Image (tube, grey):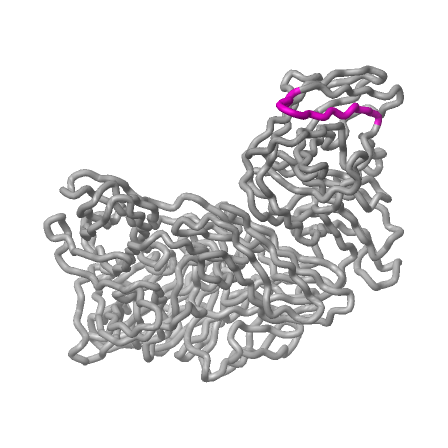
């Protein structure tokens, strides 16, 4: 083992202690866009606040009808076309260093005003505003903003505050007071933690709305959009899902939906002392999911849907899409005797408005039939915690219960755990069975918003993809010229989906490449690597990431962003698109090859056949723009399958080539897998300027993707667990080992001491097993001048021979330390 000089070691410690964010080119980040929205058909001047926004060029929006022009350093004029429907869209800065992560920008259909510059901290100093207006403001520490409106008795005024939904830190509280300062209504959370008050005006007069923070916190990042509205607003719909390509009659529930229309029917609701109205409309569903201008949580990546815009409403609603018929909600199906008969495959859309309400459904199933049963509640914005049970033919014995999805595939960057149940059920015999849907956290109070979807389907595999940043902080996808950038592609597998998924990029700009990668069997994350040529031109625009799998529908990946870093539970959301920028220049580039031929003294050049129980040697090369700069390089794996232990290797200063190795355990599944290699080092920066202006900076470079085909093993090599772990210089040892044939292999096996690169200081005599032989010894001799320490991934390397050709490969790591 080569040891680093002390100075180099100190520098290396500085490198590895650098955070991932610091180890990259400066990433532009938007902290806030103020105001966070505007009225369609108008323009609004916004102020952009963030970091690394050097030479702001423009803002780009996820809707082509939203354009921008820089007015001055950080002030941009946003033009909103008449064709832009109300909803939430993404804005990104385009700067010298590329594109930022997105921030939410809301397009409305009402007059917009800014926060008053005069004091309006209490009811008596409230600022007068008209009805049907949106106020854009922010809350400072201990601050409270008050606004006064005038209304007639009986009017229905909807007071709503958007904060968390527009990427704000504000934990808003809404209150309504009369002119004498008496509080008439309060709400601390309706759309998640964003509040809403359905205010029935008790008498003619003036009333005051107060906005504050729940814990009296505040900052410029505690911004909000306050709506005081008498126009239509849809809360939810039943059914919440429509079959693809079909038209269905849908009942909309909300406020001010029908005016004096007789089709409007009040529905009992004790929330805020108000009531929902409902109106029936015909809605035609598209054949494929489409972009939804709503703030969507990470858990909603597995919900296919489209946006419905009700005339006059300020915000769309999400309607789900399904490939099977949709069964309407039944009334009175709350016991086994009144269960609704259904035929699967189908979807149902129901409502658990009562405190302890249950919905029962009866199915007929044959023995051995496999069903995928899934509920949607939290993922469609419904305030309930669904549980689903399958009951026996008598409705007495619970056969299985499905509850929360506790697995979090994306960690803090993209938390996917949720309260919706799903699972696989196999009918034990022919007959009738009951499916029971209940709310685990219902309580005593009724709530009509408790709408759910129930899927009863065949187990036909399906998957969803999300493009997830590789840091816990907001970050765009910026590819420097001559360099690479990686993102993680996360697969949410459903309905028994376990097979391989190929992921590929489409609509890339000239000069940018992105090789296909593979998610192996049951693998849920893979790195996707973009590479830019040195002469690629600057570019900013949307791209597509597509997933392909046998016997499953092709999927387009959803974009994602980290809204704010540093939250223990994470704070991220889906984005309208996946956008990429080519900008800047990379000081280093990393090349990797996990399929290089191996030199064998008996069999010559060997084409490596990867299999469980073998070792993958990845040859790497680091190319520097400044070849004179020398620094240690720490290598590690990126996106390794869960069963494969990651490794690190350090190359000393001046050495830009090396090998990093990974052991594939005997239990690893076969199939195609993709990973990459990461290098941490320093390099002079900026690139392309005079040396006197450059400074060494820590960088992390990712390699091209490394894809390996893991094929069934022919044998498994194991070193005796009691084998010596140390060898003295000049000593000779006998190391026991076995090479057990499996999967029908009967050929001979040759085993010898091996390392990626020469074996240093040790000699080993190879052994060949023929016939039934599967165990033996390899003699190891240590040279008198052998370097002290361990050699990385020293191994017993066996090849299996078929008709005098070395075909199969297997290894066992030899943990042997050379001592005095």
Relative to residue 123, is residue 114 drawn left or right?
right
Confirm whether the magenta stretch covers residue 644. no
Observer-nearest residue: 769 or 404? 769
- Where on the picture, by quarter, is residue 177? bottom left
Query: Picture coordinates of residue 240 (x, y %)?
Result: 30, 64
Give, as a single range, the part of the protein colored magenta: 761-775
- Where on the picture, by quarter, is residue 175? bottom left
Relative to residue 277, is residue 301 drawn left or right?
right
Which residue is at a point 63% across and 74% down the rendered structure image?
58
Query: Picture coordinates of residue 316 (x, y %)?
Result: 37, 71
Query: Picture coordinates of residue 236 (x, y %)?
Result: 29, 65
Q: Quadrant of the C terminus?
A: top right
Q: Can residue 648 be seen?
A: no
Q: Quadrant of the N terminus?
A: top right
Which residue is at a point 45% across and 76% down the rendered structure image?
113
Observer-nearest residue: 497 or 14? 497
Query: Picture coordinates of residue 100 (x, y %)?
Result: 61, 64
Instruction: Please say if 274 is above or below 601.
Output: below
Instruction: Please say if 56 is above or below 727.
Output: below
Relative to residue 192, is residue 439 drawn left or right?
left
Observer-nearest residue: 630 or 605? 605
Confirm whether the magenta stretch covers residue 767. yes
């Amino acid at each position: 083992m080569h040891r680093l000089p002390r100075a180099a070691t100190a520098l290396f410690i500085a490198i590895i202690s650098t955070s991932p964010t610091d180890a990259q080119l400066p990433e532009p980040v938007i902290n806030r866009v103020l105001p966070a929205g505007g009225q369609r058909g108008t323009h609004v001047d916004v102020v952009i606040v963030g970091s690394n926004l050097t030479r702001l060029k423009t803002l780009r929006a996820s809707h082509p009808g939203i354009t921008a022009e820089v007015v001055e350093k950080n002030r941009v004029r946003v033009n909103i076309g008449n064709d832009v429907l109300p909803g939430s869209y993404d804005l990104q800065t385009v700067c010298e260093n590329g594109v930022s992560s997105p921030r939410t920008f809301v397009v409305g259909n009402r007059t917009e005003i800014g926060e008053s510059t005069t004091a309006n901290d209490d009811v008596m100093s409230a600022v007068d505003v008209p009805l049907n207006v949106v106020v854009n403001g922010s809350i400072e520490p201990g601050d409270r903003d008050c606004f006064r409106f005038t209304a007639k008795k009986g009017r229905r005024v909807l007071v709503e505050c958007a904060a968390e939904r527009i990427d704000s830190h504000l934990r808003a509280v809404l209150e309504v007071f009369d002119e004498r300062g008496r509080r008439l209504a309060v709400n601390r959370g309706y759309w998640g933690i964003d509040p809403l008050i359905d205010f029935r005006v008790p008498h003619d007069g003036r009333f005051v709305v107060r906005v504050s923070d729940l814990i009296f916190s505040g900052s410029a990042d505690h911004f909000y959009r306050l709506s005081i509205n008498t126009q239509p607003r849809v809360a939810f719909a039943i059914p919440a899902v429509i079959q693809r390509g079909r038209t269905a009659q849908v009942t909309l529930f909300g406020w001010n939906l029908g005016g004096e229309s007789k089709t409007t029917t009040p529905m009992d609701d004790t929330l805020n002392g108000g009531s929902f109205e409902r109106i029936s409309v015909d809605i035609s569903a598209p054949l494929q999911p489409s972009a939804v201008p709503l703030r969507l949580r990470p858990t909603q990546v597995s919900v296919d849907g489209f946006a419905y815009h009700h005339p006059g409403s300020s915000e769309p609603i999400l309607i789900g899409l399904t490939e099977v018929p949709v069964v309407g909600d039944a009334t009175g199906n709350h016991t086994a005797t009144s269960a609704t008969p259904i035929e699967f495959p189908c979807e149902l859309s129901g409502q658990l408005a009562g405190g302890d309400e249950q919905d029962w459904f009866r199915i007929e199933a044959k023995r051995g039939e496999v069903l995928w049963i899934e509920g949607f509640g939290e993922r469609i914005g419904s305030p309930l915690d669904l549980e689903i049970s399958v009951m026996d033919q008598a409705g007495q014995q619970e056969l299985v219960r499905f509850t929360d999805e506790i697995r979090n595939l994306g960690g803090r960057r993209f938390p996917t755990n949720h309260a919706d149940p799903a699972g696989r059920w196999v009918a034990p015999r022919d007959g009738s069975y009951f499916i029971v849907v209940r709310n685990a956290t219902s309580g005593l109070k009724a709530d009509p918003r408790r709408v759910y979807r129930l899927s009863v389907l065949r187990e036909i595999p399906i998957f969803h993809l999300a493009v997830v940043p590789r840091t816990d902080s907001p970050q765009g996808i910026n590819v420097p010229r001559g360099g690479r950038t990686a993102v993680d592609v996360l697969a949410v597998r459903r309905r028994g989906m376990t097979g391989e998924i190929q992921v590929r990029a489409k609509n890339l700009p000239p000069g940018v490449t992105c090789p296909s990668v593979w998610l192996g069997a049951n693998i849920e994350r893979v790195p996707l690597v973009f590479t830019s040529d040195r002469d690629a031109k600057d570019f900013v625009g949307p791209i597509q990431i597509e997933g392909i799998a046998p016997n499953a529908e092709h999927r387009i990946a959803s974009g994602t962003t980290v809204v704010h870093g540093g939250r223990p539970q994470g704070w991220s959301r889906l984005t309208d698109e996946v956008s990429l920028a080519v900008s800047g220049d990379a000081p280093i580039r990393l090349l990797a090859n996990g399929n290089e031929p191996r030199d064998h003294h008996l069999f010559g050049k060997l084409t490596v056949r990867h299999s469980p129980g073998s070792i993958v040697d990845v040859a790497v090369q680091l190319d520097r723009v400044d070849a004179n700069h020398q620094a240690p390089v720490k290598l590690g794996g990126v996106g390794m399958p869960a069963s494969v232990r990651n490794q690190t290797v350090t190359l000393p200063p001046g050495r830009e080539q090396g090998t990093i190795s990974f052991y594939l355990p005997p239990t690893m599944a076969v199939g195609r897998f993709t990973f990459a290699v990461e290098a941490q080092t320093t390099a002079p920066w900026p690139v392309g300027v005079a040396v006197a202006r450059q400074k060494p900076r820590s960088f992390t470079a990712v390699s091209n993707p490394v894809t390996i085909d893991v094929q069934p093993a022919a044998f498994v090599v194991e070193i005796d667990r009691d084998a010596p772990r140390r060898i003295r210089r000049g000593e000779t040892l006998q190391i026991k080992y076995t090479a057990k044939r499996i999967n029908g292999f009967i050929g001979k096996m040759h085993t010898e001491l091996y390392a990626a690169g020469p074996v240093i200081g040790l000699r080993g005599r190879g052994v060949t097993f023929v016939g039934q032989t599967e165990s033996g010894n390899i003699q190891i001799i240590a040279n008198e001048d052998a370097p002290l320490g361990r050699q990385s991934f020293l191994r017993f390397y066996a090849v299996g021979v078929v008709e005098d050709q070395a075909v199969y490969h297997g290894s066992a790591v030899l943990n042997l330390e050379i001592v005095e």
